Amino acid sequence: MRLHTTTVLSLSTLFLLALAGCSNGSSGAADSISSAPVSSAPVRQEGKYAPVPAPLSSAVLDKRLLDESDLGEGYTRKPQQPGGHDDVTVSGCPALVKLGGDAAVGGSFAFPRKAKASFTYAGGSDSEVTEELYSGTEENLSKGVGRIFEAMTSCPRYQVLVGATPITVTTRKLPAPKLGEERWSQLLTFTVGGRSSVVKQTAVRTGTVVVVASGSVALVDAHVAKAVDKAHGAG
């Protein structure tokens, strides 16, 4: 099944992070991974933020992204990647293939209200973090993000062809931080040409806004709460 990278939430971000990490060697041992029990499903709880009454525009979301002053010393913002990306061919994971339909044509997975920023950190060659903000109705965000995370973690191992580059992906659900009303977290290991790179991805929904942080395990853990705060005007 061929999926376009812009249609599946954060797949393009994850692959770009993985390719960058693999080009610099393995990062699997560099980050400390929690051994706490894996959560089996998103957990709902009353958040500390008042629900946003309506979806926010992309312009408003852009102003609520983290910047260098929020992250601290040593971070550099990366220029935005060009809009076009190679197609992604997925094999060995029926749930991802089944996404087809709406995902493959942009449907509910291509949330139109969005903003994105990526940063590198001077502390290590693999130290990158990307923040994405999405806004839409609570129902669409909950169903869309939940379905994608469920599909991506349903297969412990699958193959991906990004353009002409073959990648082996292994996935594992992780306990999500107690933020927002719904949250999801996963650990993905990408192996390219014998080299592996680890990427953590955590998503938090509060009302009509979803915050997605992807990248180095330590950096995602360090900044996701701050990203959620700022996305809701608390930062």
Image: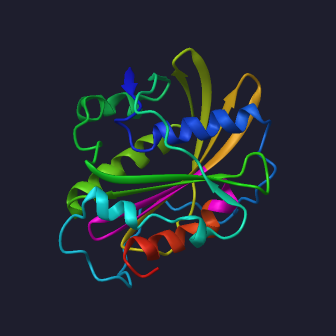
Decide: is 176 above or below 26: below
- Colour setup of the view: rainbow
Decide: is 44 above or below 15: below
Seen in the image, is 141 located left or right of residue 166?
Answer: left
Decide: is 223 above or below 235: above
Q: How many marks?
A: 0
Seen in the image, is 166 located left or right of residue 39?
Answer: right
Residue at 46 percent of width and 29 percent of height: 93
Q: Residue furthest top?
A: 164
Q: Residue 102: tell me if it is visible.
A: yes
Q: Residue 215: tell me if it is visible.
A: no
Residue 9 within the segment the image draws in magenta: no
Q: Position of residue 9 (x, y in %)?
A: 39, 44
Decide: is 73 above or below 131: below
On the rendered image, what quadrant is the N terminus found in? top left
Q: Position of residue 206 (x, y in %)?
A: 34, 71
Q: Position of residue 96 (x, y in %)?
A: 40, 33
Main secondary structure of the magenta stretch: strand
Residue 217 within the segment the image draws in magenta: yes
Q: Position of residue 166 (x, y in %)?
A: 60, 19
Looking at the rendering, the stretch of residues picked out in magenta corresponds to 200-219
Seen in the image, is 226 located left or right of residue 105?
Answer: right
Residue at 38 percent of width and 85 percent of height: 48
| Foreground pick, 173 / 21 | 21
The image quarter in which residue 158 lies: top right
